[in-house]
Amino acid sequence: MENEDRKFDVNAAMPAVKKELDTISSSFCAAKWKQVTVHLAIGQTHSCHHPTTHKIPVEEVLVNPSAIHNTKFKKQQRKMMLEGERPPECDYCWRVEDSPVKEGDEVFSDRVMKSSEIWARPYIEEIKNASWDDDVNPTYFEISFSNVCNFKCSYCSPEISSKWMEEIQQFGHYDLASFGYNNLDYLKQIGKFPIPEREENPYVDAFWKWWPDLIKGLKVFRITGGEPLLSKHTHRVLDYLIENPQPELELDINSNLCVPDELFDRFVERMAIIQEKKAIKNFKLYTSCEAYGKRAEYIRYGLDYNKWLNNCHRILSEISDSKLTIMSTYNVLSISSFTDFMKDILTLKETYTVQPTRPHPVSLDIPYLRWPHFLSSWIITYDMLKYVEESVTFMYKNMQQTYWLPLCGKGYFDYEVSRMKRIYRVIEGNMQKPDWEYLGRSKKDFYKFVNEHDRRRGTDFLKTFPEYELFYNECKKTYEEDKNRSLISKIN
């Protein structure tokens, strides 16, 4: 369990956790009760972070502030899990659980991994014995206060990034082959058009009403965005913790680590005060990157890779007992430079070594991207699979043998390698049983997306990713053949 800085051997412990869950049902996951992400700017929520968000009815939060987590819809998903049904919204895990597995080489879905955490596993029996429609206080709470952000990541959208909002308002949505990517009219239609931070927001009001009661039982409180360091509410939370210490709380903050220097300096100073006062139990900074150098900057438009890497070092060196988790949303543009990126992460691991007060300061999470579909990693051509194999091999060669002090080394943990290996399995599985309609649609959209991306932002895809030329040309061919078929169809 990710508890007290202890991690167990994935291969040894996960079967036991899975067995414990499956005694309740084969689809049961404690995260549906105890973990939540709430996007207050759009009034939507999900548990865990893999399912798409759903709308929080305003009328529910006006009566019950905890409904920003305990929506009626979510309670129905809990009921399905208790009865052994698979909620369709949890297909991230079902895809992993249904992927081909070689004997003695089992991989585990996040249904199992998340349920093993300290904020989840101790409450499994309590959940089992409660009614499915009870209100539940989560123990892991992730919150986004607003969409204010200085990045335009390829896989992001206007409800999460104000920079994306500005681009779409200027140029319009991306007119892709199968849908309008980041269409503002569509966001309004599905209730995801954000409320600006400067305006009154009933979901923000509900959160601050619930906050004094909510925080009492929290194990982890995580602030995401947008870019949290650009939100006034993040600083309000920090001020609250300075004045109202929570010695059992882990505070986690997401940041792209590329905000203006003076703002980053103030944040570091404030967190140093919180740590010196022991106002919280642990502090962890989450940051995102999934490629190396210029390739990373293409994916995460607004990123300065060298500044990002330097600020990773600042978090670990200037805030006492801090930890850094790097979230790598593995996608089709990650593939060719991921191993080089892994080398920089390995250097971080080697620089900030094991200490009694900070046993494991640098960790890595590697979820695979599903949406938008044209950036998913399994649309690659077979010749690119070698890059994925190379990354898995590199991590295995630099893997430490144990998580336990004082024996652990400075390399990758077994659970990190397991996450990379399962990505390989998913890609390989999709290649063995390809969905040709999905691949065709995705490749057409990929071709149109990168061309429009280059036009709007002054980037150059093939100059940045020359090794993708064969893949790019295949996507172009797929697009042009479909276009010609459409023209012939119209003529006939």
Image (cartoon, helix red, strand yellow):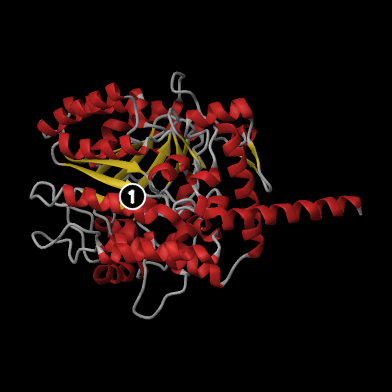
Where residue 76 appears, as percent x and y from the top left, is 49, 52
Where residue 490 appears, as percent x and y from the top left, is 87, 50
Label 1 amino acid?
A: Lys
Where residue 258 appears, as percent x and y from the top left, is 34, 32
The quadrant of the picture occupied by the N terminus is bottom left
Q: Residues within 10 Å of mark 1 (few under 14, many from 20)?
A: many
At x 51%, y 51%, the residue is 466
The quadrant in which residue 437 appears is bottom right
The quadrant of the picture occupied by the C terminus is bottom right
Compared with 346, 23 (above or below) is below
Q: Mark 1 falls on what kind of element?
A: helix
The quadrant in which residue 335 appears is bottom left
Q: What residue occupies the far right of the structure in this picture?
A: 492
Q: Is residue 28 visible?
A: yes
At x 45%, y 65%, the residue is 386
Where residue 38 appears, as percent x and y from the top left, is 41, 38
Compared with 166, 386 (above or below) is below
At x 47%, y 57%, the residue is 90
At x 62%, y 38%, the residue is 452
**133 left or right of 314 in image:** right
Q: What residue is shown with label 1?
A: 34
Foreground pick, 374 / 457: 457
Foreground pick, 9 / 119: 9
Compared with 267, 475 (above or below) is below
**338 left or right of 58 in image:** left
